[in-house]
């Protein structure tokens, strides 16, 4: 073997010594620049827009789409809207309903729909932010029906524009099939017996249809973005997996059937990377059966080892739930259900022994998906009232996410701006949020390593400007 020339060896040693110093200088310079912009919100946003953000792990697909898009798509599809309630529906239009296309040339109707379908211009009054936020989904549901691929394209393009590499949109697959099986089998407190009865009743028969949903959604996204052409849009480079949404405000048999179907679907189709439970945590079934739901998840986790779970937990404040119901939701999601990620975690300071829960999260590597805009609009938590700093101080992995950026009229960059301006975080912590987002993702180990390596290169390019 030919020996390496001495001068090459010396050069490599010098480079090895200089690169860390150069990287440190880039981080220090970038941190200094952020501090200079901390009180200049418009310039801060432009700065953070280009910062690598890794991923948005907590995003509901329908809630991530802006209402303007839903109106236009609904108009193209001949959908209707009620001019009193602003509920969208399928044709024919009757009574107070008019074609959604009428809104395209009627600015008053257009604005009324936007206000009803999102938090645009909302001020609390007779209706709270919580109630208005959750009501939007029943209003625009029909307008969005059949447009999941278009919605994914919009979300992916927005992600790419903000230097985001990976998203995990939440979708509810085949709810009707799960509901039918639940009604057929009924509830049995013996989870093993109920699981077997539902399997025997054919709950897995809906897996191909759910797989087709994923295929069609991605195919429509690719067609809209021109991903197979030379003019492919930037959103084509954003990695996508789906998380299964389980509607928690349902009778126990229906919740169990959805959970079971979700685990079977994840086992059969890797594009469904994780499972989550959605709907307001303070709703009747959600609140009364919370402990039961956590036991269901724990049981099914043991039947399907290796499948991923993230749970909405602690999306509560005292105005929404009695004191007794504020004391255990995060703790149960972590210690009973065994969730790998927690969404919101907003009621931490009202929980029993939060230090123990934080210690368990750190020890088990449980991550927090923090949704700053959503928590402010729905729960009234912001600034120092928000517990994100408690999680950070405890050493819990935290990542910023949007929840429902279309409904909230926000985006992921806005979460980073809030983290700076209302939480006081600096650049190094923001960078940690972005890195931990990928580390906490439900990508495969190989995909995760590749994404983290790509992210490291993006950070080097970003920080090079500020050395």
Image (tube, grey):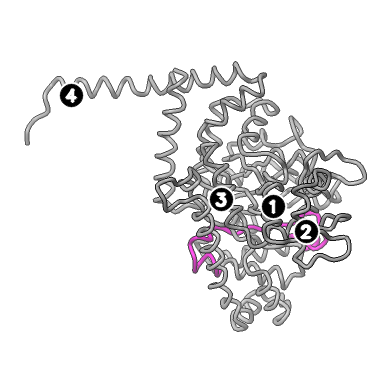
Q: Which residue is mark 3?
A: 153
Dot placed on the residue nearer the N-terminal end, 2 or 3:
2
Label 3 to label 4, Cα distance in Å? 49 Å
**Residue 120 placement, left or right of 398:** right
Dot placed on the residue nearer the N-terminal end, 3 or 1:
1
Q: Mark 2 near mark 1, Cβ–Cβ under 8 Å?
A: no
Dot placed on the residue nearer the N-terminal end, 1 or 4:
4
Residue drawn at the location 67% of the way across and 19% of the way down: 39
Label 4 to label 2, Cα distance in Å? 74 Å
Q: Nearer the viewer, mark 3 or mark 4?
A: 3
* Callout 2 secondary element: strand
Q: Nearer the viewer, mark 4 or mark 2?
A: 2
Q: Which residue is mark 2?
A: 99
Label 2 to label 3, Cα distance in Å? 25 Å
* Callout 4 secondary element: helix
Q: Nearer the viewer, mark 2 or mark 3?
A: 2
Q: Mark 4 near mark 2, Cβ–Cβ under 8 Å?
A: no
Dot placed on the residue nearer the N-terminal end, 3 or 4:
4
Label 3 to label 1, Cα distance in Å? 13 Å
Label 1 to label 4, Cα distance in Å? 61 Å
Q: Which residue is mark 4?
A: 9
Residue 289: % across, % down: 77, 63
Q: Which residue is mark 1?
A: 70
Farthest residue, direction front: 105
């Amino acid at each position: 073997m030919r020996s390496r020339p001495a001068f090459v060896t010396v050069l490599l040693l010098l480079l090895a010594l200089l690169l860390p110093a150069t990287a440190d200088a880039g981080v220090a310079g970038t941190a200094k620049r952020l501090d200079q912009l901390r009180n200049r919100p418009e310039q801060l946003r432009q700065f953070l827009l280009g910062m690598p953000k890794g991923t948005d792990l907590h995003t509901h697909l329908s809630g991530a789409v802006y209402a303007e898009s839903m109106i236009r798509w609904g108009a193209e599809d001949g959908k209707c809207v009620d001019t009193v309630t602003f509920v969208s529906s399928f044709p024919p239009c009757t009574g107070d309903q008019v074609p959604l296309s009428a809104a395209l040339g009627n600015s008053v109707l257009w604005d009324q729909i936007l206000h009803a379908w999102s938090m645009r211009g909302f001020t609390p009054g007779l209706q709270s932010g919580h109630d208005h936020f959750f009501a939007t989904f029943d209003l625009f549901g029909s307008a969005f029906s059949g447009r999941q691929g278009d919605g994914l394209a919009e979300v992916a393009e927005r992600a790419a524009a903000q230097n985001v590499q990976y998203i995990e949109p939440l979708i509810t697959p085949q709810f009707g099939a799960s509901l039918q099986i639940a009604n057929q089998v009924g509830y049995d407190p013996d989870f093993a017996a109920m699981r077997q009865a539902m399997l025997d009743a054919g709950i897995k028969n809906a897996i191909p249809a759910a797989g087709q949903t994923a295929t069609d959604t991605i195919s429509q996204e690719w067609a809209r973005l021109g991903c197979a052409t030379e003019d492919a849009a930037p959103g084509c480079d954003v990695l996508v997996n789906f998380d299964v949404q389980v509607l928690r405000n349902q009778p126990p048999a229906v919740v169990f059937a959805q959970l079971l179907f979700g685990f079977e679907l994840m086992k059969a189709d890797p594009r469904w990377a994780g499972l989550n439970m959605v709907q307001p945590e303070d709703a009747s079934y959600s609140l009364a059966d919370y402990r039961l739901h956590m036991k269901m998840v724990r049981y099914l986790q043991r039947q399907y080892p290796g499948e991923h779970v993230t749970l909405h937990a602690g999306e509560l404040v005292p105005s929404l739930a009695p004191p007794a119901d504020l004391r255990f939701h995060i703790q149960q999601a972590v210690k009973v259900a065994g969730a790998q990620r927690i969404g919101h975690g907003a009621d931490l300071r009202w929980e029993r022994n939060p230090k123990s829960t934080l210690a368990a999260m750190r020890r088990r590597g449980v991550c927090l998906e923090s949704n700053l805009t959503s928590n402010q609009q729905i729960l009234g938590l912001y600034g120092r009232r928000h517990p994100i700093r408690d999680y950070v101080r405890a050493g819990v992995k935290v990542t910023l996410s949007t929840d429902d950026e279309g409904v909230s009229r926000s985006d992921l960059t806005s979460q980073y701006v809030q983290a700076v301006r209302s939480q006081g975080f600096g650049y190094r912590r923001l960078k940690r949020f972005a890195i931990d987002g990928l580390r906490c993702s439900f990508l495969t180990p190989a995909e995760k390593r590749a994404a983290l390596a790509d992210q490291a290169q993006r950070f080097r390019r970003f920080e090079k400007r500020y050395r």
